[in-house]
Amino acid sequence: MSRAELREVVERLARGELSPEAAEERLARAPLVDLGFARLDARRGERQGVPEAVLAEGKEPEQVVAIVVALRQRGHETILVTRADATVRAAVREAVGEVEEDAGARLLWIARDVPEPAGTVSVVSAGTADGPVLREVATCARLFGAGVRLQEDVGVAGLHRLALALDDLRAADCVVVVAGHDAALASVVGGLVAAPVIAVPTSTGYGVAAGGIPALLAMLTSCAPGVAVVNIDDGFGAATIASRIARAAAGAV
Amino acid sequence: MSRAELREVVERLARGELSPEAAEERLARAPLVDLGFARLDARRGERQGVPEAVLAEGKEPEQVVAIVVALRQRGHETILVTRADATVRAAVREAVGEVEEDAGARLLWIARDVPEPAGTVSVVSAGTADGPVLREVATCARLFGAGVRLQEDVGVAGLHRLALALDDLRAADCVVVVAGHDAALASVVGGLVAAPVIAVPTSTGYGVAAGGIPALLAMLTSCAPGVAVVNIDDGFGAATIASRIARAAAGAV
Amino acid sequence: MSRAELREVVERLARGELSPEAAEERLARAPLVDLGFARLDARRGERQGVPEAVLAEGKEPEQVVAIVVALRQRGHETILVTRADATVRAAVREAVGEVEEDAGARLLWIARDVPEPAGTVSVVSAGTADGPVLREVATCARLFGAGVRLQEDVGVAGLHRLALALDDLRAADCVVVVAGHDAALASVVGGLVAAPVIAVPTSTGYGVAAGGIPALLAMLTSCAPGVAVVNIDDGFGAATIASRIARAAAGAV
Amino acid sequence: MSRAELREVVERLARGELSPEAAEERLARAPLVDLGFARLDARRGERQGVPEAVLAEGKEPEQVVAIVVALRQRGHETILVTRADATVRAAVREAVGEVEEDAGARLLWIARDVPEPAGTVSVVSAGTADGPVLREVATCARLFGAGVRLQEDVGVAGLHRLALALDDLRAADCVVVVAGHDAALASVVGGLVAAPVIAVPTSTGYGVAAGGIPALLAMLTSCAPGVAVVNIDDGFGAATIASRIARAAAGAV
Amino acid sequence: MSRAELREVVERLARGELSPEAAEERLARAPLVDLGFARLDARRGERQGVPEAVLAEGKEPEQVVAIVVALRQRGHETILVTRADATVRAAVREAVGEVEEDAGARLLWIARDVPEPAGTVSVVSAGTADGPVLREVATCARLFGAGVRLQEDVGVAGLHRLALALDDLRAADCVVVVAGHDAALASVVGGLVAAPVIAVPTSTGYGVAAGGIPALLAMLTSCAPGVAVVNIDDGFGAATIASRIARAAAGAV
Amino acid sequence: MSRAELREVVERLARGELSPEAAEERLARAPLVDLGFARLDARRGERQGVPEAVLAEGKEPEQVVAIVVALRQRGHETILVTRADATVRAAVREAVGEVEEDAGARLLWIARDVPEPAGTVSVVSAGTADGPVLREVATCARLFGAGVRLQEDVGVAGLHRLALALDDLRAADCVVVVAGHDAALASVVGGLVAAPVIAVPTSTGYGVAAGGIPALLAMLTSCAPGVAVVNIDDGFGAATIASRIARAAAGAV
Amino acid sequence: MSRAELREVVERLARGELSPEAAEERLARAPLVDLGFARLDARRGERQGVPEAVLAEGKEPEQVVAIVVALRQRGHETILVTRADATVRAAVREAVGEVEEDAGARLLWIARDVPEPAGTVSVVSAGTADGPVLREVATCARLFGAGVRLQEDVGVAGLHRLALALDDLRAADCVVVVAGHDAALASVVGGLVAAPVIAVPTSTGYGVAAGGIPALLAMLTSCAPGVAVVNIDDGFGAATIASRIARAAAGAV
Amino acid sequence: MSRAELREVVERLARGELSPEAAEERLARAPLVDLGFARLDARRGERQGVPEAVLAEGKEPEQVVAIVVALRQRGHETILVTRADATVRAAVREAVGEVEEDAGARLLWIARDVPEPAGTVSVVSAGTADGPVLREVATCARLFGAGVRLQEDVGVAGLHRLALALDDLRAADCVVVVAGHDAALASVVGGLVAAPVIAVPTSTGYGVAAGGIPALLAMLTSCAPGVAVVNIDDGFGAATIASRIARAAAGAV
């Protein structure tokens, strides 16, 4: 299927000239290699129940739509689109219908066959501005089959707020710390829990904090034991490894 | 105990004027807060069997000796000294006696009561020059109670070498990838295994590779799922989180 | 010809008050040095058939138009405008008429006398988001007289996708690898082929990946033999050297 | 006095051919502008009792000696030489006689007329390796007329160690936090005290921590209120502002 | 109170369907922990009269409104919203009514019970473009209870302008220097006053000056004694520590 | 004059309710210190004929207008506004009347009493995209009283274009080289002329070239003798020093 | 073969207690996987005549010796050891006997069966200090089967020196440019030849040039067509791709 | 002449087996192109009296010797060797005889026919540690034919020291400012003089100052008019342009 044909299908879908079902059928008839810009794994059987993730950033909206439609046609029940801005989300929503979304976290997902939650990931953020990344971790981890607990706005500058969260953190199989600026929360939490800690630096802040480099460096140089780090704002990446850790600890792998 | 007194005890120990036992006794009589430059946790009971780690870098040799001696006096059976150069290792060896060492990995350790291994950490390195960090991961993870398997010099430029290692990697509860330069091994391994992957960038190489920044950035931006990263050359840090993950997966926490 | 006169010619061309032919004539009558802001090589004879490339970035649309018109008037049959945004492309299209375009790759070209393809450049990208740069390489290399084959979305995280592309890559005279993030594809491909590899880092991605520095550094420090690197997103540069290599290998220089 | 003459005086002083008194006299007879490489302030009266500081780094040992000798000849009772390595310290010690030194902190000082301590500066460090900078802060602040209290090795990873130090910190007129790595201690202390906090990043650590950039960035982006930062390892700078703050709070300015 | 409910309250408030009083009441009835995205300290008694500061950057407008409303409901008389763009300021203004604003400094505040000014902070800027940060320092310091004097556009390139400001600077308990580019003003002022100097680098300028890194580095490496630095453009941070220093010097702590 | 009054004057001027003359008078009556945000030098007599320059970047349009009006009222005949975007230029144009402008170079100027040209500055640029900076150098240098010659689009990749410019360059009293990317033109020109060379890196280009750092570094490390460098895109700075050099060489200082 | 045994063999070889032949035999009897720290490819037949390269940096001398000995035992006639310092070279020389060396280029090689030269690589350097990297390119390219011509110290600041080299450069199948500082030579050469250009930045120089970043960036942003870049000081990498290009152009692949 | 022969000549010269005259003769007989590693300009006539400069850094001592000897043989009376460490200086001194040296500035020179001084360069440094670079500027500028005046240790933190230097600075044809750390001296001097200012950042200092980047950036972003910058520690470069400026201003070009 050529790029022009693809665009036509997606546009007709958006204008209502083509039903989602018809679009799916047209895309499904095309052998996967015809998509050209993307090669999808068709190992459907072995992956049943595991969500398929599509990184929307850098892709045209119609490319994202085509991938989502093709995945569904091939039997994927749970699909996650990350870094999806408003245009992408609208395109997918129109094409596919029932989706769930989180605008702040730039997520869109279809969750029809999520695995039974196993193990617990505790996600804790330093400030309100870290909320979108915290929610990205939470939603992704849930779709990957982990139980999730949230603790938001647990600043280090007020340790009493951390104290309230401590029981929750200590009961988790894996703790994800989401923080920008100096990310001191990673070290403080790392010193208080025995579970593995996955740290997510965020790009919030101004001056030298903008972009998240200080948080990244601070997390990499944390003196607390048992901390490893993912890319800045990479809630999806943190959820991937955290849910694997938690599910394994619960014997669910 | 003043710094001058401390130096005197350590020097007499080194000259053989004081037996290790006598030195231990002198240090033990001093309340811990007297060390001045270091505050040791004395929660001996709850930590029995867990190795105590001392970062030698930035400390004077006699400070490291004093800490090790004090820890032993308080009942710690397993002690690990990291980033220990030849001078530090010699000082501790003379003061304490039976120790194990790895010069390349700059490690020294006393292991009298290591926990029964539980779970498996598979450590894989890209090249021979990554050997010291690979061995740091391995030794530390063993002392932290994980089973360890090694795969050295598994370069990406020759994928057939990776193929030989694959069964081993897939059987692990946690995989640690040690690589410098472009660290492509992290993405390749991350795409082949389902276990959590902890990536350790190394500072090997020349030109822009020197210092390890390309490896660090590459590992942070790996497209493979389930990868988290520690500081450059931080074999100890990787071992800490990897052994926690592996032991939890084996139900040993 | 003063800048004001130039602007007038171009504006009248855009309003239809001046036919493309008349505009060409006016510009052609002006000695080349009169353009002022640009000095064009007039060695027409010796270059017949070789495309002339114009970097649009940083130039005013009317400057690009004037250069293209002047080149055509002097007999250049094949002209390539790179980094051409929508405004520039529209201005040239209106002024010159029959052009080809690729909006995503920001390319516009006139190809009337492309050399017979000689040698093969195989262009391979890591992900869908690298598509625009991959297409920039492909179009430019074709205009420079090389045969081109494409392999898109060949991720390292799924090596089986690479396996499908391997025969194609091994048959090429030069391989161009287009990848962002950790750019591990460069090392993996470099380890599998014997032809020279030109690596193009892309600026796709977020967090530390944004801007393409990790991909650039990774490609520069690749352990695979036979790899050299061009600027981030520089599909044009990669095509230039790759087509030279391929044509020479085919004996066409 | 030419550079050659200067060197001769210092060398004869070092060989014992010239008494310190004679050397002082020779240097004192030379008008200050004759030193050439240094211009000393001679406003002796207004500065009585305030220590004069000499940065040794980048100066030849004989230059440091000449400055110290000239300052003493002009009536300065309290002189502080910072960043003084063993060679410089030996040269000054031989030339001047009774000095105090701290090898680790690279300090040498003569303190004959230190102002009465006023106000309290509490200096707290994160780890043993921060000791030299902590001692540089302490010695300098004492010479500048502040009362000083020390809390060493107060890691964030073990908050109970911080708890012990808290009363001391809260009683201070100014708190100086000395920390490397992720410098989380700055934020934690900043959240617990109401006094101004001066943060000193240290260059301890390895990997990305080496050189102190992560600590510097973390301290600059601390969420805690009331924190300002000095250069990496700049114990002298921290002492200067901290002692001013403390003395003013105690009404001693 | 769920995020959806929160948004509804704020939107109705904006449309005039809900009076500010009613909105306050609805939010006040919700236990603080229900805000979810933010945890507010309720230690009202001990903080009476101290302004509560809300960093708007990174928060949704309705989140800022909810926090401000909740704070007022709990008795805070003085509230400061920093980094508040036009949208945020409009939202708070509509919801709360009588506020003061400074668009350039991106500040909004309610000041009903400001402490009696004690001590003097002198704020001096290098150029007109530093005005917004200078005003942020000034407004914040006033709300924190310090007396404030301003000296704007005191460039180093024309030292006679500095001369006019000197008496003012020398009379201050704390001097705040606001400067971009090479920030030479910090060193010059630091050499002329005996009070502590807090330096604020600004992000004004172009080329390598853009973003403020040169100013930050210059201030950190100033040779003048008694200077400490805050984050780029961090007028709020400078005001916090400067007002503490000034009030303590005036015996008001 | 308060900020509010200032804004009112400027707005009335813009609406035509106030003639330029009346506005000038109102501003002139206010003592200069009343402008508040800016301090103007009134040393009119000694500066007669020397252009006064106003950096518009970071200033509000009404601030720029007020400064320009005040300068003219005080007798400055030649005024130069740099980094002036369209809004600023429109505001000044409306308020003051007869001005000259260069939109691409973001310049606006009033030139009534330019000094007689003395000496020659030859300005040479590498590519068409460097045109705005080249024109900024040229206009500023003319206003500062130097004779100016231009050579545009003299690329290093085609040395024959440079050959045509050589006589011109060798006759100059000072050569200004304007170039982005790798800025090789600076070294090539520096090797061919005996006059001082001022190099201006430009921010043109993409990938690692974007922002101009490679050009800046290349110019700073040029092996050619007699080259010094100004900030990225700083045509004004280059013109300042180049015109001083040229006028002095012509004996006009 | 354990590491201890390996060390013993190498030490006995060095002390003359073991003949090179006996050592080779002992190592050869050990299966390759026993080396542990290195995995050697044994595909001897297909690689006959192609040199095997060993990167010595980061390896212990005895590890390098063991690899070289094992390679020879398996029939490799041409072996190249790069980044070999004096210690490594001495160890290999003692163990293996007849070797060739270039101390400045840190190379050691055994060349018994070098392929017949095909195609021409022209290597050109900017200054005398680039000599070691130039020689590394030359020696490696010769061992890889390319004809090599050298042009040393061809500075851009004196274009007449380049003129002398031009015929040579234009006759080459591939040109390698070796340059530090601003690396302007890459652009100038790139503008003069039609062959592919491989650029090698060198780390020579001081100030911002030290380490080679300006040269690397300049080469990546060269405006000349047909240039690609390798890592700083990576003469080996440049030789690998250049010899492939040259041999293919000569029809020898 | 091969490299081996060259080394032999130089070694025999050093052992006294060959007189300097004989060595010169041997080298002189070899055609210049035989030096291989260096190409010397032989345009002796046109350059009479202009010093020839040799950058020693990165060259072998015997290479420097050979170049110096060859230059003298060809009639150069004034030769300057920069960045010459003790080994290089000793080698040249032994080979050539009467030389002048400045160990701190790493300079060696032979000055037999220096042009008559014309114009005045005033060199001013911020601190004693900048002395070596200040002296490099001074010596080079003298050899290039400029009159030179020095002002050392003129710190900005004590403006009264600058006041003493002002008459001198204002009388110069060109001012060279040498400063490390925040380099505020450049802006202050730039605001006080009307002559062109060449700024030399130095690498003195610790923490973020180490290496000289803050000084470089500060000088590039100086608000003072008429300032241009050379590489860090590049006293030679500053002297080159400054002496050209001064001589031209004095009508001596």
Image: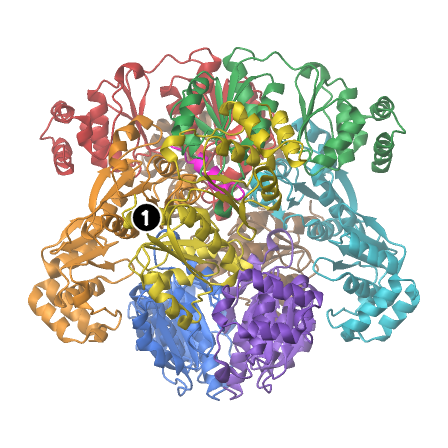
Chain colours: A yellow, B orange, C green, D blue, E purple, F cyan, G red, H brown
Image quadrant assignment for residue B47: bottom left
**Does residue E40 lie above or below B181 as drawn?**
below
In the rendering, at what x and y percent does residue F172 appear?
73, 41
Specify the quadrant of the image occupied by residue G21: top left
C9 displayed left or right of D154: right
A85 or F56: nearer the eye?
Answer: A85
In magenta, the rendered stretch is C210-223
Chain of the residue under label 1: A
Rendered residue at 57%/35% (across/down) = A65
Please state if C188 lies on the left or on the right of B23 as rendered.
right
Q: Which residue is mark 1?
A: A247
Residue C207 sits above or below residue A69 on the image: below
- Please tell me which residue lies in front, E166 or A228: A228
Q: Is residue F80 visible?
A: yes
Relative to H56, residue H226 above or below: below
Instruction: Let me know if residue C212 is in the magenta part.
Output: yes
Based on the displayed image, in which of its 4 quarters is residue C89 positioned?
Answer: top right
The amino acid type of the residue labelled 1 equals: Arg
Does the magenta segment cover residue F106? no
